Amino acid sequence: MASKKISTLLSRSFSSAAPCFFSRGRSVAGQSRLICRYNSTSVAVEEPITPPVSVKHTQLLINGQFVDAASGKTFPTLDPRTGEVIAHVAEGDVEDVNRAVSAARKAFDEGPWPRMTAYERSRIILRFADLLEQHTDEIAALETWDNGKPYEQAANTEIPMTVRLFRYYAGWADKIHGLTVPADGPYHVQTLHEPIGVAGQIIPWNFPMLMFSWKVGPALACGNTVVIKTAEQTPLSAVYAAKLFHEAGLPEGVLNVVSGFGPTAGAALASHMEVDKLAFTGSTDTGKIVLELASKSNLKPVTLELGGKSAFIVCEDADVDQAVELSHSAVFFNQGQCCCAGSRTFVHEHVYNEFVEKARARAMNRSVGDPFKVGIEQGPQVDSDQFEKILRCIRSGVESGAILETGGDRFGSNGYYIQPTVFSNVQDDMLIAKEEIFGPVQSILKFKDLDEVIKRANNSRYGLAAGIFTHNLDTANTLSRALKVGTVWINCYDVFDAAVPFGGYKMSGNGREKGIYSLSNYLQVKAVVTALKNPSWL
């Protein structure tokens, strides 16, 4: 599987619409019209499906051993379907980060990992990928239980993508090399690409295993050691995977996993003087703090993959039905909890009204429910904080004058489910058009021509990604070069490949992950100059 479109699972069509009631909404012209919304009170109460997995690992993994936090503290990780406790997990703190960094430092300075051949490292990573593939069902179930994402999405798409990425970087391990450089004089000049040392990595909760692979894969392929801090909302899958890595033959201390909170464990890792490199994925505001902590400590280099408010541009020549389905996937995938979600849907004025009606119908037809149930497209949001934030953003949209086409409230009475929500008549200065909602909310904006939409799409502090839907090659070329973003998808969206770099412009971060570009994040370049005596050639 060389590449994977992670929104493929969202393209299914469902024959029966969700229950709705009719109320009055304001049209663009100021006249009232019927708006169809979800009727959350009609949702049947069902017992949550029992996850097909048990929680085996809740401790920290330091120096190849499962250990309790030094303080003895634990914290609960919750089932977003119900808000109930899944397990109590070790709460790592400063002392635990110190222990993990010490183990990683010793493994790098004295251990076998950077000293074994690149081919041997490659074989261990490949063995881990095989084990990961064999345990797909268990890890996918942990992802769904802890995060709320549909099990089918995790098992059929995300874990296979994780396996593919580790195999990709296993292939790179023995292909990293420097250059021989000609010099103006009797000198032999070569460059060495050396592992940077101890890499600190902080991953988010929306794609725990994928982000684990994006960070750990290139770091280990380059010969580094790692301390990774998991998100407090989703600590279960990464520690399970790390255990498999040791079963594959990874030496002690090479990969250490600390669960805990950002202001304590995360801050300790970012500011640690013995960490040589830091990688962070999360919000822009937290990214600023991480960068500041790194600069105030030992000036460690930092890779940041941060927030987004990506534009999805539907041009005048678009097939509206196809554009509706693609834009729906672009924003609603993973409950909308995706940094590159196409959450600003710009639609040409000639097809705008038709698009809005069909987008509303598609959202109403979206299947929401227990993510372990077959055929479910949307599960709950990850936790109560995210749930409440999304509802606040929806209220802001209504109050600012956008038309609520459908959704707008919680779904059901238990858990953190939110109705798929669509707004039309959205203006650029509205909060729902500017801020990253990170939820199942589509904002549809109207535009007249390319110059206008380029200006408006670029008028954002973010620059992570964009989508273009057109059959005109000239239009696609014009837009793809004009948009100030790190990834442009043309007539597709959320297509991720292990070899394709990913990262943002502006306040969406710096550096690139995946592909050959991510290797440079974990390497130092050293120039070695040797004087030559009576060389026969230069």
Image: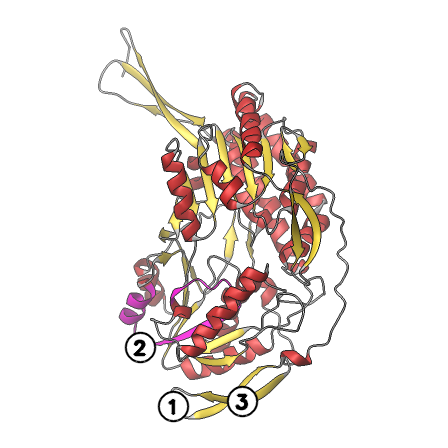
**Picture coordinates of residue 349 (x, y %)?**
36, 80
Q: How is the image coloured?
A: secondary structure
Q: CA distance from mark 1 to mark 3?
A: 15 Å
Q: As shown in the figure, which amino acid type bears the numbered disc 2? A: Lys
Number of other residues with Cα within 10 Å of mark 2, as a class: few under 14, some 14 to 19, many 20 or more: some
Q: Magenta span has 197?
A: no
Q: CA distance from mark 1 to mark 2?
A: 21 Å
| Mark 1 vs 3, N-terminal side | 3
Residue lying at the far top of the rendered structure: 533
Q: Secondary structure at mark 1?
A: loop
Number of other residues with Cα within 10 Å of mark 1, as a class: few under 14, some 14 to 19, many 20 or more: few
Residue 133 left/right relative to 94 = right
Q: Which residue is rendered at x = 37% and y = 41% of the image? A: 292
Residue segment shown in magenta: 434-457
Q: Secondary structure at mark 3?
A: strand
Q: Which residue is rendered at x = 37% and y = 90% of the image? A: 29
The dot on residue 448 is 2
- Seen in the picture, residue 417 relative to 58 is either above or below; the reply is below
Q: Secondary structure at mark 2?
A: loop
**Foreground tag (3 vs 2):** 3
The dot on residue 30 is 1
Q: As shown in the figure, which amino acid type bears the numbered disc 1? A: Gly
**Foreground tag (1 vs 2):** 1
Which quadrant holds the C terminus?
Answer: top left
Q: Quadrant of residue 6?
A: bottom right
Q: Which residue is mark 3?
A: 23
Given residues 90 and 378, the one toward you in this image is: 90
Q: Magenta span has 437?
A: yes
Residue 338 left/right relative to 242 = left
The dot on residue 264 is none
Q: As shown in the figure, which amino acid type bears the numbered disc 3? A: Ser
